[in-house]
Amino acid sequence: MKHIFVFLVLLTFGFVAAQTKTDSITLVPQTQINAAQRLLSGNYASAVTVGAYAEMLYNQPEGDNGELDIQRMVLLFGYRFNDKTQFVTEVELEHVNEVYVEQAFVNYAVGSNVSLRGGLMLVPMGIINEFHEPTTFNGTERPGMDNAVVPTTWREIGIGVAGRFNDISLAYQAYVFNGFKSTEANGEGGLSGFIGGSSGLRGGRQKAIQSTIDSPTLSTKFDYYGIPGLRLGFSTYFGKTQAEDDIENVEGANIGIAMIGLDARYAYDRFTARGQFINASLSDTEAYNNATGRDLGSALRGFYVEGAYNLLSMDREQKLFVFTRYEQYNTHAGTAGSLIRNEAYDRTDVTTGLTYHIAPGVVVKGDYQFRSNASSVSDVKDRLNFGIGVWF
């Protein structure tokens, strides 16, 4: 199996090295938009805009039964009240039987390049949390670090501003959100915790479901797009977790979070690449773990690099990318107090496969994941994946 992996890696980057043409860029990171941006930027004759994206997946771990799933279907609705004011919402159905509102916000254009926003919005951290429509990324599944370190899809209620300075090729976003919910009273005079373990902060997402707020958080994102084919991102998130009134002053009820992210996307002719690094430093985790019995690390960290090459000619509408992605992520990159690091939380995934864009907005995917961790007693099974995705 290792020989197959080495061969596929060499195949992917061998194609890259052999490419010398200087045609126009196939996928332009500077102008890539997500579903909400598409609704906001469209010049539609009707005030009402409707769209959707969906993912249908098959996962086959080695030695286990496979799983078939309509992982998500998201209905997109936009309404333009006038030239300055728009409303955007996304209604998500997960695994057929779960329903969530993923986004619901008002966008008010103060000027041609600056808007005020308020409502339920995506937290702009890294790439995938904002750009997760199935036609925008390689691989049947999203990167593992965008589940454990950045808890996609991560959205909360807030207000803020978004815009760009075209003269210096800089886009910006800045929002004040409610934070993660870390604890609740357990009914026995103590606390139950929502965050920790292999999933990091994921269990603390409030998702606009009667969200608690006692201390707002600050989220920012800056994107530089001044170099042809390249987009560079810098993200920050600072604040504390939230707790209900009756426990917010209990020792260990809240923790502090300082998260920083760097990301890059590049496209040249048939070649595309992307990478991401995220580090989250958490404070007061020793008191939190003592109060809740959880095993939250004091640092979460992860990165990935990915290269892809379009095997079809540039003049064709269809695209067939062969890709390889290498990622490492650890929800026990640091621990506080007496908590011993769990080596099973230190994970490495290598994903290689094909992404076939059979028409604009329709993609068929297949890949194999080599998965491992640093523990000598905990095994992670490799996995074969296939998927179909649409976005319109």
Image (cartoon, grey):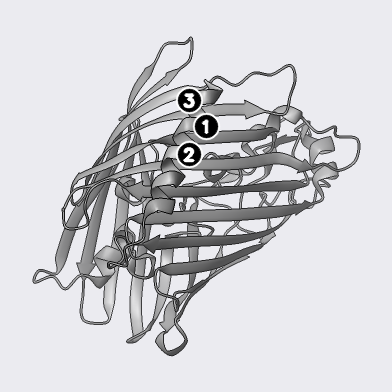
Q: Earlier in the sequence, mark 3 or mark 2?
A: 3
Q: Is residue 120 above or below residue 11?
A: below
Label of residue 4 in the image:
3
Under mark 3, the amino acid is Ile
Q: Could you give the CA–CA distance between mark 2 and mark 1, rounded to whole angstroms?
A: 6 Å
Q: Seen in the image, is 279 located left or right of residue 291?
A: left
The residue located at (63%, 44%) in the rendering is 201
**Residue that carries the numbered disc 2 in the rendered image:** 10
Under mark 1, the amino acid is Val
Badge 1 crowding class, 10 Å Cα cut-off, few under 14, some 14 to 19, many 20 or more, is few
Q: Residues within 10 Å of mark 2 (few under 14, many from 20)?
A: few
Q: Which residue lies furthest to the left in this view?
A: 45
Cβ atoms under marks 3 and 2 closer than 8 Å: no
Q: Residue at x 75, y 33 (%)?
A: 294
Question: Which residue lies most toward the right here?
Answer: 338
Q: In this view, does 53 lie to the left or right of 309?
A: left
For residue 329, above or below residue 47: above
Q: Quadrant of residue 21?
A: bottom left
- x and y, in percent, of residue 217 in the image: 62, 64
**CB atoms of marks 2 and 1 within 8 Å:** yes
> In terms of secondary structure, where does tag 1 sit?
helix
Question: What residue sits right under mark 1 in the picture?
Answer: 6
Image x and y of residue 6, in percent: 52, 32
| CA gap, disc 1 and disc 3 | 6 Å
